[in-house]
Image (tube, rainbow, N blue to C red):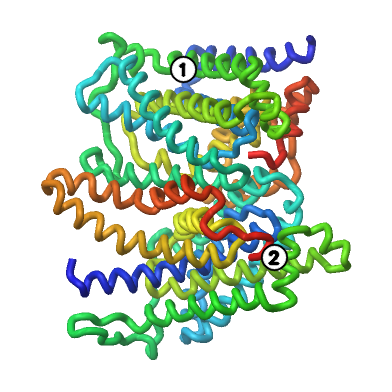
C-alpha cells in the first residue's frame, strides 16, 4: 500500500471515528445515567440526516439547515422522552428494547414514505467544497476535515461539561446513586430530560454532518447503532473517555485495518484464496477487536468508575 | 393440577388446529394460509429456543436470528457440495450453529445485563456481514437452491411432500424438549441464576456453564428452524441474519409471554397474523406496527399468554418476576 493511500485511510478512519464518537457519546451517557437502553438512538442519527436534507431544500442554506435540524432533533428527542422513554426508566431492559424497536420500525417506515426508499444526497456547502493539498499526490476534502474538527470540538466540550461543571457533576452523581441525588433535592427527572435531549441532539448532529458524505437512506441508522454498541463495549459503558477511545479504535480499524488485512492476505495467500477470504475476514475485523477486548477486559478499556 | 393442565389444553388445541389445517384449508381454497402457518411455525421453533434464554435464563439476546441463518447456510452449503440426506444436513447445521454459539456465548457471558444484549447484537451483525461477503454462495443476493434435501431419497421433507407435517412435528418436538428441559433441574438452576445469581453460585452451581449450555442448545434448535426454512423457501439469504429478524423473535417471545409454555407459539401466530391483517389493510403497515409495539411495551406486561389465558400457575409468576436485571 502506498503512503498516500495509507494517509487517506488514516484520515477517513479518523473522520469515521469522530462520527462514531458523536453517536456513542449520547448512547453511553443515556445508558450510564439512566440505565436506559435506547435502540432508537441510531434512528435519531437518520432523522438528523433527513432533517438537514429537508431544511436545505426549504431554506437553500446549509448553515440555516444545520441549525434548524439540530433544534428539530432536540425537539424530537424531548418529545420521545416525554411520551415514551420517561415511562420506561424503572422498567426492565426488555420493555425498553421492545418500545425502542417499535420506534425504529415506525421512523424508518415514515422516512421511506416521506422521502422514498431510494438514497438521497446533498452537497457540502460552497465555502467547504474544496480540498486541501496535503502532499504532492494527496488532496483531501475540506468538508471532511471540518467534520473531524467538529467531532473533536464536541468531544472536548462534552468532556469539560461532564468533568468540570455542575450539570456534569450531577450527571456523574446521578449515574452512581440516583436515589441519593434525588434525596438531596435535585430534580432527577429534569436531569434525565436534559441528558436525553443532549444525547438526541448529538446523534442528530452526527446525522447532519454525515449527510453530505454518506448517502441518506431509510435504515441508515441501524448499522451505525450496532457499531456504536461495539464502541461502547470496547470503551466501557457510561464513560465519555471510553467512548472516544473506542470510537477512534473502531474507526481506524475499520478503514486502515480493512485495507491492510486485504493487502496482507494477498501477500501470503494466492489470489484465489485471498479474494474469497479477504472480504469475509475484513467485515469481521471490528467484531474480532471487540471479542479481543472482551477476553482481556470484559468491563471495557476505560470503564466509568462512578465518573463519566 | 388443574392449572397446569390448562396450558397443556391450550397447546393441544393449537396443535390440533395446526394438524387439521392442511386437510381443511384446501377444501375452502385457502392454501395461501398454509404458507402463513408454515412461516409462523418456523418462527415459533426459533422463538421457543430464544425463550429458553430470555424467559428462563434471563439472558436477553438480540442476535438469535444469526443462528437460524447460520443453520440455513450450513445446510445450503452442504447441499451445494453434494450432501443430499437431510439427516446429514441436520447434523451439519446443528454442529456449525452450536460451535458459533459456543464461541460467541463464551465471550458474551463474560459480561451480564445489557452488555450481553449489545454483544449478541454485535455478533449477530458480524454473522450477517460475513454471510453477505460469501461471494461463491450468492453474497448479498442470497443463494437459490435448485435441488432440495431428501430423506434417504424420499421427497417427504420437501414442499412437494409432507414438509408441513415435518415442520409441525419438529415444532412439537422443540416445544416438548424445551418444556422438559425447563422443568428439569437444568431449568430450575437457570431460573435460580436469573433470580439470584449470587445465591446460586454459592450453592455450588457454575452459572457460566449452565448459561453457556443453554445458549448452545438454543442456538442448535434455532439452526433446525433455519434448515427447515431453507427447505421451505428453497433459498437462503443474509437477510435471515438481519438484526431486525432477531428483534422480531424477541418481540414474539415478549408478546407471547416470557417463560410461559405457549408464549412463543402464541406470539409467533400473533406476529404473522398482525403482519398479514395490517398488511392487507394498507401497504405501510409498519406505521401501525411500530406504535403497537410501543403500546405493548408500555401497557401489556404479562404478554399474550397472560392476556388470553390468565392462569396463575407457578410458571407465570416466574415470568412476571423474570423482568429482573440479571443477565
Q: Position of residue B272 (x, y in %)?
A: 54, 33
Q: Is residue A34 left or right of residue B59?
A: right
What kind of element bears circle 2?
helix
Q: At 51% from the left edge and 54% from the top edge, which residue is drawn?
A: A229
What kind of element bears circle 1?
helix
Chain letter behind tag 1: B
Answer few, some or many: residues within 10 Å of disc 2's Cα (few below 14, many 20 plus, some between 14 and 19). some
Report the Cα–Cα distance between label 1 and label 2.
Answer: 50 Å
Q: Is residue A39 left or right of residue A148?
A: right
Q: Which residue is mark 1?
A: B26
Q: Does residue A13 appear anywhere in the picture? A: yes
Classify residue B132 by image quadrant.
top left
Q: Is residue B295 left or right of residue B272?
A: right
Q: Is residue B120 left or right of residue A164?
A: left
Please name whichever residue, B228 or B182, is drawn nearer the observer in this view of the structure. B182
Q: Which residue is mark 2?
A: A79
Amino acid at each position: 500500500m502506498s503512503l498516500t493511500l495509507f494517509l487517506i485511510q488514516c484520515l477517513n478512519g479518523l473522520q469515521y471515528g469522530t462520527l462514531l464518537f458523536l453517536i456513542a457519546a449520547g448512547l453511553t451517557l443515556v445508558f450510564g445515567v439512566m440505565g436506559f437502553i435506547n435502540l432508537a438512538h441510531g434512528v435519531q442519527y437518520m432523522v438528523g440526516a433527513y432533517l438537514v436534507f429537508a431544511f436545505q431544500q426549504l431554506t437553500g442554506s446549509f448553515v440555516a439547515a444545520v441549525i434548524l435540524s439540530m433544534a428539530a432533533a432536540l425537539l424530537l428527542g424531548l418529545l420521545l422522552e416525554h411520551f415514551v422513554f420517561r415511562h420506561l426508566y424503572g422498567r426492565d431492559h426488555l420493555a425498553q428494547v421492545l418500545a425502542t424497536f417499535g420506534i425504529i420500525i415506525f421512523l424508518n417506515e415514515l422516512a421511506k414514505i416521506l422521502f422514498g426508499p431510494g438514497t438521497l444526497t446533498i452537497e457540502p456547502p460552497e465555502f467547504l467544497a474544496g480540498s486541501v493539498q496535503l502532499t504532492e499526490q494527496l488532496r483531501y476534502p475540506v468538508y471532511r476535515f471540518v467534520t473531524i474538527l467538529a467531532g473533536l470540538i464536541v468531544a472536548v466540550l462534552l468532556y469539560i461539561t461532564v468533568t468540570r461543571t455542575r450539570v456534569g457533576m450531577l450527571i456523574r452523581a446521578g449515574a452512581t446513586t440516583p436515589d441519593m441525588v434525588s434525596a438531596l433535592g435535585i430534580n432527577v427527572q429534569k436531569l434525565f430530560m436534559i441528558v436525553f435531549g443532549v444525547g438526541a441532539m448529538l446523534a442528530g448532529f452526527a446525522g447532519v454532518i454525515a449527510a453530505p458524505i454518506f448517502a441518506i437512506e431509510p435504515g441508515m441508522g441501524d448499522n451505525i447503532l450496532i457499531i456504536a454498541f461495539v464502541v461502547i463495549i470496547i470503551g466501557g459503558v457510561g464513560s465519555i473517555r471510553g467512548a472516544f477511545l473506542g470510537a477512534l479504535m473502531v474507526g481506524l480499524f475499520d478503514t486502515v485495518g480493512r485495507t491492510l488485512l486485504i493487502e496482507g492476505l494477498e501477500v501470503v495467500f494466492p489470489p484465489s484464496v485471498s479474494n474469497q477470504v479477504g472480504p469475509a475476514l475484513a467485515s469481521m475485523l471490528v467484531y474480532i477487536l471487540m471479542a479481543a477486548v472482551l477476553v482481556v477486559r470484559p468491563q471495557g478499556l476505560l470503564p466509568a468508575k462512578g465518573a463519566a | 393440577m388443574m392449572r397446569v393442565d390448562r396450558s397443556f389444553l391450550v397447546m393441544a388445541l393449537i396443535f390440533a388446529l395446526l394438524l387439521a389445517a392442511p386437510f381443511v384449508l384446501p377444501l375452502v381454497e385457502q392454501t395461501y394460509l398454509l404458507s402463513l402457518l408454515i412461516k409462523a411455525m418456523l418462527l415459533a421453533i426459533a422463538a421457543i429456543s430464544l425463550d429458553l434464554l430470555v424467559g428462563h435464563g434471563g439472558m436477553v439476546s438480540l442476535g438469535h436470528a444469526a443462528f437460524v441463518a447460520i443453520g440455513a447456510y450450513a445446510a445450503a452449503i452442504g447441499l451445494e457440495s453434494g450432501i443430499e440426506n437431510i439427516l446429514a444436513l441436520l447434523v451439519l447445521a446443528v454442529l456449525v450453529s452450536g460451535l458459533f454459539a459456543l464461541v460467541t456465548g463464551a465471550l458474551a457471558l463474560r459480561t451480564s445485563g445489557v452488555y450481553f444484549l449489545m454483544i449478541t447484537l454485535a455478533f449477530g451483525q458480524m454473522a450477517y456481514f460475513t454471510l453477505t461477503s460469501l461471494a461463491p454462495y450468492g453474497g448479498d443476493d442470497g443463494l437459490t437452491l435448485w435441488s432440495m434435501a431428501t430423506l434417504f431419497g424420499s421427497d417427504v421433507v420437501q414442499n412437494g411432500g409432507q414438509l408441513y407435517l415435518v415442520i409441525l412435528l419438529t415444532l412439537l418436538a422443540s416445544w416438548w424438549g424445551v418444556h422438559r428441559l425447563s422443568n428439569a433441574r437444568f431449568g430450575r438452576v437457570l431460573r435460580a441464576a436469573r433470580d439470584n445469581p449470587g445465591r446460586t453460585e454459592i450453592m455450588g452451581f457454575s452459572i457460566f456453564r449452565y448459561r453457556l449450555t443453554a445458549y448452545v442448545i438454543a442456538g442448535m434448535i434455532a439452526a433446525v428452524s433455519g434448515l427447515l426454512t431453507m427447505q421451505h423457501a428453497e433459498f437462503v439469504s443474509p437477510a435471515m441474519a438481519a438484526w431486525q429478524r432477531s428483534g422480531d423473535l424477541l418481540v414474539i417471545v415478549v408478546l407471547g409471554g416470557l417463560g410461559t409454555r405457549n408464549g412463543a407459539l402464541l406470539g409467533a401466530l400473533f406476529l404473522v397474523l398482525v403482519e398479514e391483517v395490517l398488511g392487507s389493510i394498507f401497504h405501510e403497515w409498519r406505521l401501525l406496527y411500530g406504535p403497537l409495539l410501543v403500546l405493548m411495551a408500555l401497557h401489556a406486561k404479562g404478554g399474550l399468554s397472560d392476556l388470553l389465558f390468565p392462569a396463575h400457575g407457578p410458571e407465570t409468576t416466574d415470568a412476571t418476576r423474570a423482568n429482573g436485571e440479571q443477565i
